[in-house]
Image (tube, rainbow, N blue to C red):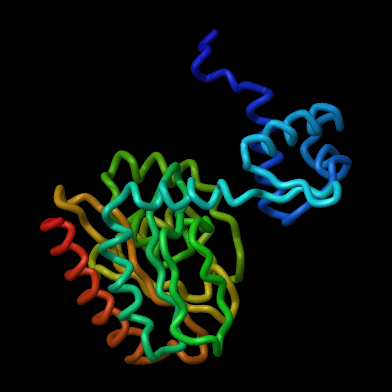
Amino acid sequence: MDRENTPVASVQTVLSIVEYLEAVGSAGVTEIANNVDSSKSTVHNHLTTLRDGGYVVNEDGHYRLGLRFLGLGESTRLQTDLYEIARPQIEGLVEGTDLVGNLAVEEQGKGYYLYRSRGSDDVRFSTRAGETHDLHCSATGKSLLAHLPSERLDSLIESLELTEYTEHTITDRSELRTELELVRERGVAFDEEEYGRGLRCVGVPVFGVDDEVVGAVSLSGPAAEMTDEWYRETLPDRLRAAKNRIEVNLRDY
């Protein structure tokens, strides 16, 4: 038996508890046990250990994630120079607009937002860092996929679920490959309401010192406003300029 690939049941239960609390906010022992398929006594024991470590807080019998996770998340984000260098560029892109600026990376076949910033409160998009997103139907995701080494790209495309979120979502692997070829040729990716109705996004890849893709930046906004030359030319040009500044600073960091 390959012990390195053998799941540890107790660890899986703890992770399920943490993920459930992340999803619902707070819950009691019975609710958690029912949703992580474990006994109440086992869940209670895990929660007690998590509480003692500062990872959960017990408020009148309901548990929520503790602020200990805040420090862990920030430490993870700061492990890459990309976050510190790209953050002011994202802020500059959205200043004075109704857009949301995004900085994303790929890990284990998922897109992760390292940073998000909203130009105004007129349109309330989520700007939570750490949120995941699918690669096949987002502008950052397609920017990342299109510039991966061919062997890794082939492996990822075969493993992606290609979930259909709207009638515009690409769910055919051959069609996705064709789309990624276009992204490589033009150096910019578009999300044509593929992840959500009424939302468009445009993104570009960011390359590191070894010329490998290390992330992607994008701008999201209401589909009714992201049209014509503004969407197809102006925003891509602004993103390319920001990308260039990020890449120059990465080389000099």
Q: Residue at x 84, y 41 (%)?
A: 29
Tell which of 69 and 183 is nearer to you: 69
Tell which of 61 and 148 is nearer to you: 61
Estimate the x, y position of residue 73 in percent, counting from the top left: 48, 50
**Quadrant where the image shows the C terminus:** bottom left
Tell which of 177 and 244 is nearer to you: 244
Residue 48 lies, with reference to residue 24, above or below; the image says above
* Residue at the outermost top position: 1
**On the image, which quarter does residue 239 sit in?**
bottom left
Q: Residue at x 44, y 87 (%)?
A: 226
Left or right of 33 on screen, residue 210: left
Q: Residue at x 56, y 71 (%)?
A: 126
**On the image, which quarter does residue 155 sit in?**
top left
**Quadrant where the image shows the N terminus:** top right
Q: Residue at x 83, y 37 (%)?
A: 33
Tell which of 71 and 170 is nearer to you: 71
Estimate the x, y position of residue 45 in percent, counting from the top left: 77, 28
Residue 76 lies, with reference to residue 184, above or below; the image says above
* Residue at the outermost left position: 252
Left or right of 206 on screen, residue 53: right
Estimate the x, y position of residue 166 in percent, counting from the top left: 61, 69
Q: How many marks?
A: 0
Estimate the x, y position of residue 75 in percent, counting from the top left: 41, 47
